[in-house]
Image: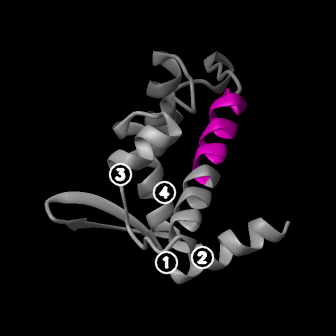
Amino acid sequence: MLLECDHHEVQVRAGFAYGSLDAVPLDTVQLDPVQLDPVQLDHSAVLMLGILELLHAEHEAGREHVSLAVICKRLDIRMSMLQRLMTALSEQALVDVSTQKERLVAALTASGEALSLALQVA
């Protein structure tokens, strides 16, 4: 999980979101700083770049679509992780996920291809 907090902090934050924090004296509320896991963020970013690179290489080889199962095997990641990453890439219009012959496949969009080319040059 990217954000870690204890049960009390969640209740306080939820109370604040719904306007009921006024009833709690501010000096009794202790909020720990939010802990981000930079290793997990970096790993996800690296995996997304790996997906873009793999799709770019397949596109260059004449294969526009690559099955998600193949991507999992080549990048050695679980399908659940790949689906989360594909959702993020799809939301940024870099990858298009569709169904072909009853299997999920992915392809780079024009924006994804442009980004992949820019990354190749850099």
Q: Position of residue 80 (x, y in %)?
A: 35, 38
Between the residue at mark 2 and the residue at mark 4, the CA separation in whole angstroms equals 16 Å
Name the N-terminal-most of marks 3 and 1: 3
Per the image, label 3 sits on a secondary structure element best described as helix
Sequence-wise, the earlier of marks 2 and 3 is 3
Q: Earlier in the sequence, mark 3 or mark 4?
A: 3
Give the number of the disc on residue 113. 2
Q: Which residue is mark 4?
A: 88
Q: Which mark is residue 109?
A: 1
Q: Where residue 68 is drawn, which disc sits there?
A: 3
Q: Amino acid at mark 3?
A: Leu
Q: What is the spatial separation of the Cα atoms under label 2 and label 3, in whole angstroms? A: 18 Å
The answer to whether mark 2 and mark 4 are in CB contact below 8 A is no
Task: Give the CA distance from mark 4 to mark 1.
Answer: 14 Å
- Visible residue check, residue 87: yes
Element marked by disc 2: helix
Q: Position of residue 95 (x, y in %)?
A: 47, 68
- The residue sitting at 63% across, 32% down in the picture is 40
Instruction: Name the residue located 58 percent from the left edge and 79 percent from the top edge.
Output: 111
Confirm or deny contact between disc 1 and disc 2 (CB under 8 A): yes
Q: Is residue 98 above or below residue 83?
A: below
Residue 66 screen position, x and y as percent:
39, 61
Is label 4 in a helix, a strand or a loop? helix
Q: Which residue type does callout 1 highlight?
A: Thr
Marks 1 and 2, Cα distance to the nearest angstrom? 6 Å
Mark 4 vs mark 1: in front: 1
Q: Which residues are magenta?
A: 34-48
How far is the residue under mark 3 from the one under mark 1?
A: 16 Å
Q: Residues within 10 Å of mark 4 (few under 14, many from 20)?
A: some
